[in-house]
Amino acid sequence: MQAEEIYGHLVEMRRWFHRHPELAFQEAETAQYIIAELDRLGIPYRYAGEKHSIIADLITTPGVPSVALRAEMDALPGQELTGAPYASEHPGRMHACGHGAHMAMVLGAAALLVKSPPPGNVRFVFQPAEESGGGSRTAIADGALDQVVAIYAGHVTHDYRTGVIMIRDGVVTSQSDRFYVRIQGESGHGARPHEATDAVLVAGTLITTIQSLISRETNPLHPTVVTIGRIAGGTAANVIAGEAELEGTIRTTLPEVRTHIHGGLRRMVEAAAMLHDARVDIELKAGYPPVVNSHPEVEVARRAARNVFGESSLAVAEHASMGSEDFSYYLEQVPGCFVRFGARPEHSEPIPLHNAAFDIDEEVLKVGAAFFEEVVRQRLSSVSDEDRSMSPTG
């Protein structure tokens, strides 16, 4: 495997990214490191500056459409607790989702493809703000999908041991929405509740009632989650709160279930307001759409994994993840495939993504670079006449 020859450099790049995490739309230093690597490889790129994507093109056949690979540049807020020698040098920020590994993998694939150019063109997209802000939409606006026939990406995970690649057809991640509930009651003395309208009581009613949307109104065969992740209300132990807030997330995989959950939330908010004689408002904010892999690109990805790592490397998740991913916006424009790379060492306990102690088995960097290289070669070998005559995608 050619990726073995560049493994040391893959580790070096990944550790640099890990030590220098930057939050969404602030990835200036990260971008400069990527640009320096592209310059070293001799791959031309476009970059409009902070809050934009780096779009690099390896052109071997002018006028022919490209196959794209995507990586994310942003990190998460949080204090790292890995204790690794390459731990974050920036307090309160860390690569708890493994994006540093993804950047190293795509840069590694670029190095392998430069060394042995494929029969067609490759685009490398390094986008900002996957974690929050939907940076893929910025990338699309920057032209990331112009003349692209397919796009691929991957994500490290402890759900599988290192060397396993999970490739799923159809829905891979859920629709993600947010809701904000604002409760306006009437404050008063804690000893005289009859003179007030308790906003905290209204909030408590909603916290428990909302869960009945899942337990009693949603088909248990349809994965659905409603989580209230933030509550706020009150100023003192002996003061009845006049205001309270709830904030939560909704995860669904079917449009009709999403519609029902949204309607149910509005209904319960209205009922709580009437029940307690309070004013209760809800704001629903659409999040990332579901990631839906296209079948032809899934077959390309499976073929690539088999060619490099053998049949035993393949895994298929029985159910879609209830997480979300802004790779979905690319897939609304062009076909593609999103995979998961096992990054858990043998005999190790899994640590979830976004955990302050999350780290990876760096052997996965070779897996990702080699897989992405082979995916490009496989897809470019099947570029059709229809692909070649495609119009630019904006």
Image (tube, rainbow, N blue to C red):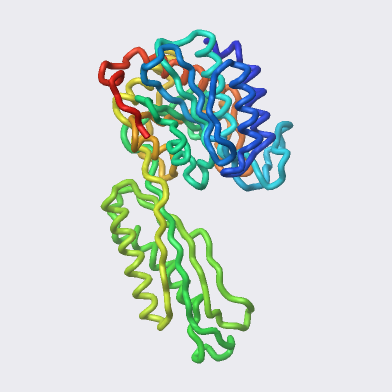
Residue, x 42% and y 74% (percent of image)?
280
Residue, x 58% and y 12% (percent of image)?
4
Residue 62: tell me if it is visible: yes
Rendered view: 74 above or below 231: above
Residue, x 63% and y 37% (percent of image)?
28
Image quarter of residue 48: top right
Image quarter of residue 167: top left
Residue, x 34% and y 75% (percent of image)?
271
Rendered view: 181 above or below 141: below
Task: Quadrant for the C terminus, please.
Answer: top left
Q: Position of residue 25 (x, y in %)?
A: 57, 43
Q: Nearer the viewer, residue 144 or 391?
A: 391
Tell me if 216 is positioned left or right of 100 in this view.
left
Q: Position of residue 361 (x, y in %)?
A: 59, 27
Residue 305: tell me if it is visible: no
Q: Position of residue 364 (x, y in %)?
A: 55, 24
Tell me if 384 is positioned left or right of 66 in this view.
left
For the image shown, how many numbered marks are present on the structure?
0
